[in-house]
Image (tube, grey):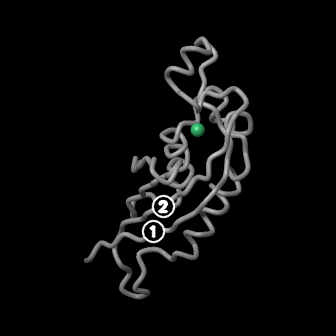
């Protein structure tokens, strides 16, 4: 059978800073640059969630995109949109909310819906030019 990848784009806005309190301000600035700004800053995150799997011969679908949209809405957008990632999201209370770590969190929240039958991939744009990819 044929394997096809279906993808859904989503969007959320969130604030963060990249900072280690066990480092000096100078070292934080040196390592994290502008993202270390103590008073936080926002990003317009663009997310692409992809599922690779067999085409169901009955429906012609790999996965119902409407269902995928609802899963992303409830698990990711409702959880992260308009949040301060450092302060509001438990996972980032002691972990830097870098694009890499956000992509892993998104994957971990979604994978339970797609185990076994599908290969899940998360692409997260922090800026139009900077993006990360995680697929487990
Ligand atoms: Ni940033």
Give the percent coordinates (x, y) of residue 121: 42, 56
Would you identify the image quadrant in which residue 89 lies?
A: top right
Please give the name of the residue rendered at 51% of the width and 77% of the height, measured from the top-left corner. Answer: 64
Label ID, residue 57:
none
Give the percent coordinates (x, y) of residue 53: 36, 69
Relative depth, front residue between 103 and 62: 103
Q: Residues within 10 Å of mark 2 (few under 14, many from 20)?
A: many
In what quadrant does ligand 1 lie?
top right
Q: Residues within 10 Å of mark 1 (few under 14, many from 20)?
A: some
Relative depth, front residue between 14 and 39: 39
Query: Which residue appears farthest toward the bottom when viewing the image?
Result: 58
Within 8 Å of ligand 1, the CB of disc 2?
no
Q: Mark 2 sits on what residue?
A: 49
What distance separates the C-alpha of mark 2 from that of mark 1? 5 Å
Q: Mark 1 sits on what residue?
A: 7
Cβ–Cβ below 8 Å for labels 2 and 1?
yes
Answer above or below: position of 70 versus 80.
below
């Amino acid at each position: 059978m044929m394997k096809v990848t279906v993808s859904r784009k989503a969007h959320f806005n969130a604030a963060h800073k990249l900072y280690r309190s066990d480092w000096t301000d100078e070292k934080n600035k040196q390592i994290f640059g502008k993202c270390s700004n103590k008073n936080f800053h926002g990003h317009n995150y663009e997310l692409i969630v992809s599922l690779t799997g067999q085409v169901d011969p009955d429906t012609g679908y790999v996965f119902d995109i409407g269902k995928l949209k609802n899963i992303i809405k409830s698990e990711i957008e409702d959880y992260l949109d308009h949040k301060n990632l450092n302060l509001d999201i438990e996972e980032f209370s002691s972990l830097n909310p870098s694009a890499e770590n956000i992509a892993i969190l998104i994957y971990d929240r979604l994978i339970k819906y797609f185990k076994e039958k599908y290969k899940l991939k998360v692409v997260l744009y922090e800026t139009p030019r900077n993006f990360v990819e995680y697929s487990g």
